[in-house]
Amino acid sequence: MKIGIVCYPTFGGSGVVATELGKALAKEGNEVHFITYRQPTRLDFFSANLFYHEVDIKSYPLFEHAPYELALASKMVNVVKYENLDLLHVHYAIPHASAAYMAKQILKEEGIQIPVVTTLHGTDITLVGKDPTYEPVVTFSINQSDGVTAVSESLKEDTYKLFKVFKDIEVIPNFIDLERFKKQKKEHFKLAICPNGEKLMVHTSNFRKVKRVEDVIQVFFEVRKVIPVKLLLVGDGPERDKMERLCRSLGTCDDIRFLGKLEAVEEVLSVADLFLMPSEKESFGLAALEAMACEVPILSSNAGGIPELNIDGETGYVCEVGDVADMTQKALRILSDENLPGFKLRALERAKTFDVSKILPLYENFYKKTIERTLSLSK
Ligand code: GMT
């Protein structure tokens, strides 16, 4: 198949999933064309089946905001037409699904039928999408997609709850490349961070409010009163400054390191003993899956789709959002020498069920079904 993938090229989960999906599809012999405004972060190598089309955004003094959606739709039209694409797969509804709808209508006028698959990732539904500023367009463009997928059952339910969506939504969970995300031998790194055999807690995120990084620091602060422990914070975002101030006011700076954005996050995860994800909203929790693949148990909230991934009492624990006291107790339970090896093993076993080799065929079948249905309806 020849597939166009539209996504955000940044570190965010939806962009990572879209890029990894494109890479896996290309490995299987499909031709994949990425359409976005910058080279996706993880698309950093050459492959005969992978192409990248940059959306140029023309500015003009009259525009306070350059119309990205129009430039994107125009680029989609050109790529579909000149590369003979079979399908467009857009990740994150805003504004990709509505731009795809526009491209589809333009192509229809020229006698070209292009099926559009939209994958809902989370905040496009639960946070930004439901805002009245965008809601009518999001509802319309989801309903106009030829196929819709969501990354968890919880996100599918939220979509039906929050929007007047009548389209069938297929749940295709996120996936992991276990070749890349696996525990590596990094003892020298562990020794540098935990010179006295301390346990190591890790959190990675985009440091937005919904991630509740303050809970990570509070839980760490409480755990540190009981056992020797260190904390690594990976990523960057709007809340980072505030979190640095919180560390200073709690007097924990010596035991916490802010590492900023990292490409090779699997190296850090390889030495971690516990991953924290106390998010207020989280449709899937890809960062937790990456940790599990590196044999790290998860202490999480019960937000959104996290409990579909992190099995309470098995791969870690699932607590109420904001319940720092419970999280502290559960963190100590996981980190005990007696329990830790079992949790690590079960986290890895769970991660294996999300291996890319198991999830990729779900997307390929979904594409085939959507292409057949769209073409038969247009006859
Ligand atoms: O978590 C974010 O803020 C980034 C966001 C994105 O779209 O890039 O992540 C969402 O999509 C990921 C990939 O499907 C999911 O693993 C995350 O759970 C989801 N984030 C939220 O729902 C908050």
Image: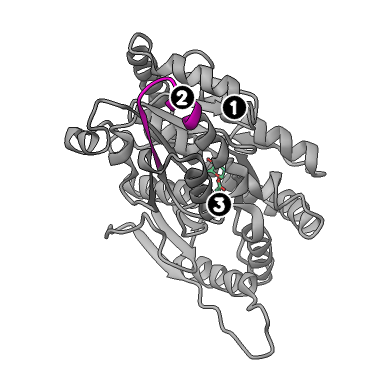
Task: Identify the disc placed on residue 223.
Answer: 2
Residue 257 in percent (x, y) is at 37, 45
Task: Identify the disc placed on residue 324.
Answer: 1
Is the CB–ligand 1 distance for label 2 below 8 Å? no
Q: Would you place residue 367 above or below residue 73 in this image?
A: above
Q: Would you place residue 322 above or below residue 348 in this image?
A: below
Q: CA distance from mark 2 to mark 3?
A: 21 Å
Check disc 3 and report the residue beneath it. 242
Are the residues at dot 2 and dot 3 in contact (C-beta closer than 8 Å)? Answer: no
Q: Would you place residue 113 above or below residue 245 in this image?
A: below
Q: Which residues are magenta?
A: 220-232
Does residue 163 appear left or right of residue 15 in this picture?
A: right
Residue 76 in percent (x, y) is at 55, 67
Q: Would you place residue 91 above or below residue 168 in this image?
A: below
| Mark 3 neighbour density, 10 Å: few (under 14) some (14–19) many (20 or more) | few
Does dot 1 land on a helix, a strand or a loop? helix
| Mark 2 neighbour density, 10 Å: few (under 14) some (14–19) many (20 or more) | many
Q: Mark 1 belongs to which amino acid?
A: Val
Q: Mark 2 belongs to which amino acid?
A: Val
Q: Which tag, 2 or 3, sits closer to the chain's start?
A: 2
Q: Residue at x 52, y 29 (%)?
A: 219
Foreground: 371 or 271? 271
